[in-house]
Image (tube, rainbow, N blue to C red):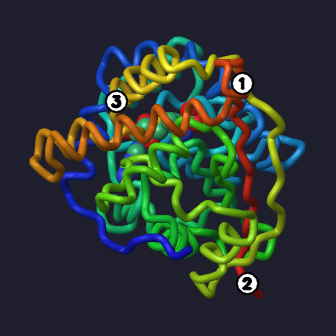
Amino acid sequence: MSPSSSHTPSHIESITSFYTQARAESYDNSAFHLKLASSIVSSLDLPPTSSSTFRVLDLATGTGLVALEVAKGGFQVIGVDVSAEMLAVARAKAEKEGVELTFLQGDAQEPRGSLKTLVGVGFDRIVCSSAITFLLPNTSLLSWSHLLRSSPSSTIVFDVPSPESSIRNVLLSQISAKYGLTPRFNRRWITSKESVKEVVEQTARLVVRSLTGTGILSSKKVGTSKEKAEEVWEETLKVTNMNPYPEALSLGKITADQFAESRASFIEEWMKLGDGAGSEIDETMENWIVVCSLKV
Ligand SMILES: C[S@@+](CC[C@H](N)C(=O)[O-])C[C@H]1O[C@@H](n2cnc3c(N)ncnc32)[C@H](O)[C@@H]1O
């Protein structure tokens, strides 16, 4: 499946409105994100000894989970994020821990546009952890490929949720497609490992070196009764990155009837995940880590 190729400025506004100060300050409490960032750092295959000439660019760095860990190894690190609130937390942590690195505010999708200082530097690693689904993947990967140091050992490392990960978001993505809605966190292009490889290789500049699963990063048991299904729907409404309906309704992109119909579909589909008697299911989160390098 080919990802969409349009990106509106309001997309950036909606991202920054989601990553508020409160969210930024509680972000590091997420065990899922801590584990994922740690897997990503392991996949960077960093040199065994510190080197201030080894450059790492962490795009959509958030609170700097990856950037700080890499910088502690003595490498030169730049973290970029669009959210001032997330960057404030990242900077405060760096200062507190006495770690030297640079954080810049800018768009990770086309960093060459908003951050001209990155052009011509030549990064040994470009990493994007838990964020490529906010971006247009093919536009981003092509742009990032131009920021890599021109060497076969330079890599881009990013992750995607596996297609079965977080079943509630899979359902939302499927149901909202009926009304042409796309969640801000867009995972529709991730249908199989092949579909991910296809997007990387569409850039014509990159090849996938490895694509591996992280294993289950989090799991919770959730019931499938009607009451539980309604509760899950209500929970999704609060995560506006995942559920496109509240915004679509407020902007008049869908009618109240269409909203009600979608809610009913979600509840029906959720109940079908169980055995018909409301049994619990395991809702798991697993990501795939993709390592790519320049085509030689
Ligand atoms: C789930 S957090 C991931 C943060 C960090 N990479 C980590 O692994 O913990 C997603 C981050 O992506 C950032 N983001 C989303 N779209 C972006 C864009 N177009 N440019 C820069 N940052 C973006 C958000 O501000 C947020 O900090």
Decide which of tag 1 and tag 3 comes sooner along the chain. 3
Q: Which quarter of the rendering shows the C terminus?
A: bottom right
Who's the residue at 52% across and 12% down the image? Answer: 96
Within 10 Å of disc 1 (Cα), the crowding (few <14, some 14-19, many 20+) is some
> Where in the image, quadrant-wise, is ligand 1 located?
top left
Q: Mark 2 and mark 3: span between their CA atoms? A: 35 Å
Mark linked to residue 19:
3
Mark 1 or 3, closer to the camera: 1
Residue that numbered label 2 is attached to: 295
Residue 57: image x %, image y %?
56, 52
Within 10 Å of disc 3 (Cα), the crowding (few <14, some 14-19, many 20+) is some
Residue 8: image x %, image y %?
23, 62
Type of the residue with mark 2: Lys
Residue 55: image x %, image y %?
64, 53
Does the CB distance between marks 1 and 2 fall below 8 Å?
no
Does the CB distance between marks 1 and 3 fall below 8 Å?
no
Decide which of tag 1 and tag 2 comes sooner along the chain. 1
Secondary element at image label 3 = loop
Q: Left or right of 277: which side holds 172? A: left
Within 10 Å of disc 2 (Cα), the crowding (few <14, some 14-19, many 20+) is few
Mark 2 or 3, closer to the camera: 3
Mark linked to residue 23:
none
Q: Does the rendering let one see residue 103?
A: no
Type of the residue with mark 1: Ile
Q: How many marks?
A: 3
Mark 1 or 2, closer to the camera: 1
